[in-house]
Amino acid sequence: MSMGLPGGIKRVFKIRELTSLSFVVALFLFVGFFNPGFLSKSNILLILNDSVVFTLLAAGTSFVIISGEIDVSIGAVTGLCAAVSGSMIRDGAPWTQAIAFTLFLGLLCGLVNGLGFMYLNIPSIIITLGTSGIIRGIIYLYTGGRWVEDMPVAFKDLARVSFLGITLFYWMALLIAAAGTLVMTRTRQGRYFAAIGDNVTCATFLGIPVRFTKVFSFVLGALFSAAGGIMFASRVGFVAPIAGTGYEMRAIAACVLGGVSLSGGVGSLIGASMGAIIMASIRPILVFLNFTADDDMITGIILITIIVVDALLQQRTMEQARRQRLLAKTQKLVTRRAGT
């Protein structure tokens, strides 16, 4: 008789968000063991608040990855939207007008990516890589290669509004991630993303609007990036032409750290938010452990490691499914022979 975990415990351990949260806690405790100052309340709050932009980008990217695609233009979209919102508010435009126009700009970028992917049959990584370069060029033309500076103090102070030590921006990001998770798990339309990412052929046969859903995932990803760009401009107080560079890699890494499968069909925005905390903590961890390695290098190592692990787990799952099918066929054959 084989021993196993009770069904309730098995279900708990299958919750990817819990696994991601456990990893965050274990990572913080590990660093705190070598440098207790890392676990101070002020440092933990600082890491949480610093992860707000990554949280939004990872949450938006989750829609794209779960639907089975990839978007590497989100860093450029973030930089463009940060520059546009910051310059408009600096030049006296009403905040509501600047924010609305910036979100529309993000929507437009996502629409170009989605339509280019679906109707021109260009692979998502290629179309978004191309639009990323174009958007970077637009940023330089828009700013003249200069930093966007001298934003109103009130706009910059908005990023410092906090409750219980956590900024208003981060509370908003968490609320958006939680609402997005509920939509994806509790509504029929939300479950379309995972269904398409899991098996696009079956989703098509079931009548799921594949084209619309995939285009919509790119639009949502860009909208979240636009919101992240607005918050970036407020938090930093200036926007360089290279703002957002490399953010796409960190957002993707945050997603897979949070349990979003790169093969599509699995994951949640809450899990991606947990991964964003890890990505935001890399630089402080290096500082507290007295490492001189570049955080981009660490991010690359983490991303490659996770991709390899994810591929191995997927291969193992497929092998287990194949064995179960063979076992079922064998049992049927034995049953038929016994009946004769």
Image (tube, helix red, strand yellow):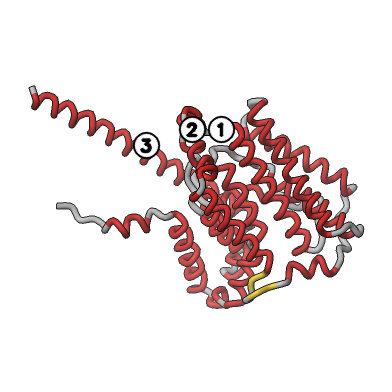
The CA distance from mark 3 to mark 2 is 19 Å
Q: Which mark is residue 133?
A: none
Residue 203 badge: 2
**Marks 1 and 2 close (CB-CB < 8 Å):** yes
Mark 1 or mark 3: whose residue is earlier in sequence: 1
Regarding residue 295, the answer to whether it shows in the image is yes
Identity of the residue drawn at 69% across and 31% down = 116
| Residue 315 in which image quadrant | top left
The percent position of residue 317, horizontal first and vertical second, equals 36, 40
Q: Which mark is in front, 3 or 2?
A: 2
Label 2 residue SS: helix
Q: Which mark is residue 318?
A: 3
Amino acid on which the number 3 mark rests in the picture: Met
Which of the two discs, 1 and 2, labels the residue nearer the N terminus?
Answer: 2
Element type at mark 3: helix
The residue that label 1 is drawn on is 210
> For the residue marked with disc 1, what is the amino acid?
Val
Say few, some or many: other residues with alpha carbon within 10 Å of mark 2 (under 14 / 14 to 19 / 20 or more). some
